Image (cartoon, rainbow, N blue to C red):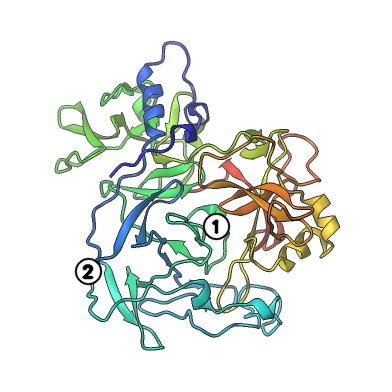
Amino acid sequence: MKTKFNTAAVISASLLFVGLGPGTASFAAERARADAHIMEDYARVPMPPGFQVIAHELEGPVFADAKGRTLYTWPSRAMRSGFAGDSENKSVCGDKVVLKSAGLMSPYPPGLDLPDPETRVSCIAFWPPVYAGDDAKPVGDWTIITRDDGKRQWAYGKHALYTSSIDRAPGDVLGGSTTALRGDSPAAREPVGPPPAIPPAFRVSTTVRGRILLTEGRYSVYASDRDGPNKSNCVDACALTWLPILAAHSAQAQGDWSIVERAPGVRQWAFRKQPLYTYSGDPGPGAIDGGDEPGWHNVYTQLTPQAPKDFKVQATMNGDVLSDSHGKTVYIYRCGEDSADMMPCDTLESPQQYRFAVCGNSDVAKCLKTWPYVVVSPGAKSDSRLWSAVWVDPNTGRRAQPSQPGAINVWAYRDRPVYTYAGDREPGDFIGNNTGEWHGRWNGYQAFWLRDIGARG
């Protein structure tokens, strides 16, 4: 299944395809325009009745229930001190309201009072379990576990499934992400979906620019602007630098995938008619250095829509970053609470004490001066559900009504406001990067990287 983006939400081809100089074959530019509209295809896997697959602009195909609510898992991961999350065939998300810290990741000891005790909710209230009916039966990778309270809960890949209370509309994927911008909380929830429709030699990883194609060994996959449809023009010395990804003799074309015969008996994979290569200059798995070479680009199974017009791409000494209209680096605040339930604390509904402590030593006025919101300009709008204009009460950091005195209209990415940093003086500065606890990965600010030189897939 291929779903089209709104045509206004297309990423600029200039950001993704370089080296399109005079004389370059038009196939590359046409391929860029076509790919910007296409959502990733996926393998049709057995599903129980009442579930569906939805196409998301960032995460690709994800599972949802009959009402369009995205399904998430909470896989167990090692923390600084112990483990958090669900082990296989087990749910630890319960109905008890947690009021004390767990000390699993924070340098502070466990047992500290958590903020806003009067409004805190239980894990299952925030992450409702996906219950299975009495007559439900396992199908494929879908199984049923029995919770400690005796209720039956759906699981996929042996991990219990949940929906998210902060997903408000069908198709929302606000509860968690598989990108680097999800934060490095080892217990973060992740949306789950069907496998991508790709040959076994490849894999797909989620980045803010799109769902990037990698080899099974996690090496980046590239295509050349100089190739034609299903024709490789990279031969001789070129093929020693750009290594054709060869297809086995038993491999078969499928969907978007075709096979190019480079020479008798030598077969090369092509995706959407683009012959595919790895780059000998990449230092290791996940490196994307080849994308800096003129005429070559990374390959995506789908591209992420363009940010609103109030933003642009700014080159820095560490790669491309999202900036405001004046070139100031944009930052996203990330926060994972150190409690047994590992609640997110970076939403507008979360306790704001964490952010105020990091951005202004709990001085709200200092916080607003040091980390100002990116305000929506008159007439600006978003053509993507990833970006939204939200009203915020700056004194509380909470969501506000447009008519509320003092409320400001600010940009939010995945419903989380974005900021600039007062310490950045010139376009390309990213002095505020990694501010906060655990270099900003657990509770703090990180630059909104679009193309980080140190990135790994």
User: Is 195 situated left or right of 119 in this image?
Assistant: left
Could you say where residue 328 lies in the image, as x and y percent from the top left? Answer: 72, 38
Q: Please report whichever mark, 2 or 1, sits nearer to the chain's N-terminal start.
A: 2
Tell me the residue that label 2 is attached to. 139
Above/below status of 83 relative to 52: below
Could you say where residue 195 lies in the image, as x and y percent from the top left? Answer: 31, 54
Whether pointer 2 and pointer 1 mark residues with C-beta atoms closer than 8 Å, the reply is no
Above/below status of 455 relative to 24: below
Could you say where residue 329 lies in the image, as x and y percent from the top left? Answer: 70, 41
The amino acid type of the residue labelled 1 equals Arg
Quadrant housing residue 117: bottom right
Tell me the residue that label 1 is attached to. 182
Q: Which mark is residue 416?
A: none
Q: Which-is-in-front pick, marks 2 and 1?
A: 2
Label 1 element class: helix
At a point 33% along the width and 22% down the height, the residue shown is 227
At a point 42% along the width and 45% down the height, the residue shown is 211
Looking at the picture, tell me which residue is in the foreground, 331 or 292. 331
**Tally of marks:** 2
At a point 79% along the width and 53% down the height, the residue shown is 406
At a point 72% along the width and 62% down the height, the residue shown is 355
Query: What crowding class fits label 2: few (fewer than 14 Cα within 10 Å), some (14-19), or many (20 or more)?
Result: some
User: Is 106 situated left or right of 295 in this image?
Assistant: right
The quadrant of the picture occupied by the N terminus is top left
